[in-house]
């Protein structure tokens, strides 16, 4: 049951992000801390992708890219490859906002 509560915290933080990005990201990170305690990897690539997306839009781009790299690696490792196309799409959006891309 604890894993589903953690998933809920992560996924329901989205509406909170609309008015308070940092508050929503903190809720997501608390959800991940709770999720880690359960020692399950169920849906982790997808959920990490959500966090990376929000970090890329409102937080430090580098942290968003690092989180996305973890999500892609985890998807390959766990076999949850159904998320890869969406993860790569989000990574591309984050890269477009990065200073590295802007300096090309």
Image (tube, rainbow, N blue to C red):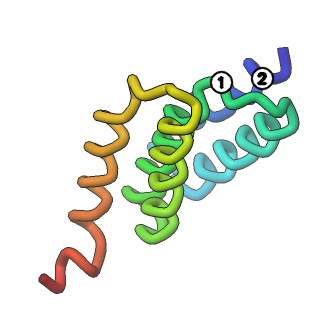
| Proximity of marks 1 and 2: CB atoms separated by less than 8 Å | yes
What residue does disc 2 label?
Answer: 3
Q: Is residue 54 above or below residue 6?
A: below
Quarter occupied by residue 1:
top right
Q: Please name whichever residue, 44 or 55, is drawn nearer the observer in this view of the structure.
A: 44
User: Going 48% across and 40% down the picture, which residue do you hit?
Assistant: 50
- In the image, taking residue 33 as reference, residue 45 lies left or right, namely left
Quarter occupied by residue 100:
bottom left
Q: Residue 32, how many percent across, how many down?
A: 71, 42
Q: Residue 11, how many percent across, how many down?
A: 57, 29
Asked which secondary structure carries label 2, the reply is: helix
- In the image, taking residue 32 as reference, residue 51 lies left or right, namely left
Q: Residue 62, how many percent across, how many down?
A: 45, 71
Asked which secondary structure carries label 1, the reply is: loop
Report the number of numbered marks: 2
What residue does disc 1 label?
Answer: 42
- Image quarter hosting the C terminus: bottom left
Q: Residue 76, how many percent across, how many down?
A: 48, 38
Residue 84 is marked as none
Query: How many angstroms separate mark 1 from mark 2 (CA)?
Result: 9 Å
Who comes first in sequence, dot 1 or dot 2? Answer: 2
User: Going 51% across and 66% down the picture, which residue do you hit?
Assistant: 63
């Amino acid at each position: 049951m604890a894993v589903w509560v953690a998933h809920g915290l992560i996924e329901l933080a989205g509406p909170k992000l609309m008015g308070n990005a940092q508050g929503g990201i903190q809720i997501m990170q608390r959800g991940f801390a709770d999720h880690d305690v359960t020692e399950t990897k169920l849906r982790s690539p997808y959920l990490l992708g959500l966090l990376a997306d929000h970090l890329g839009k409102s937080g430090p781009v580098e942290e968003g890219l690092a989180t996305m790299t973890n999500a892609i690696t985890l998807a390959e490792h766990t076999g949850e490859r159904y998320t890869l196309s969406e993860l790569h799409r989000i990574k591309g959006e984050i890269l477009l906002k990065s200073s590295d891309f802007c300096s090309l």
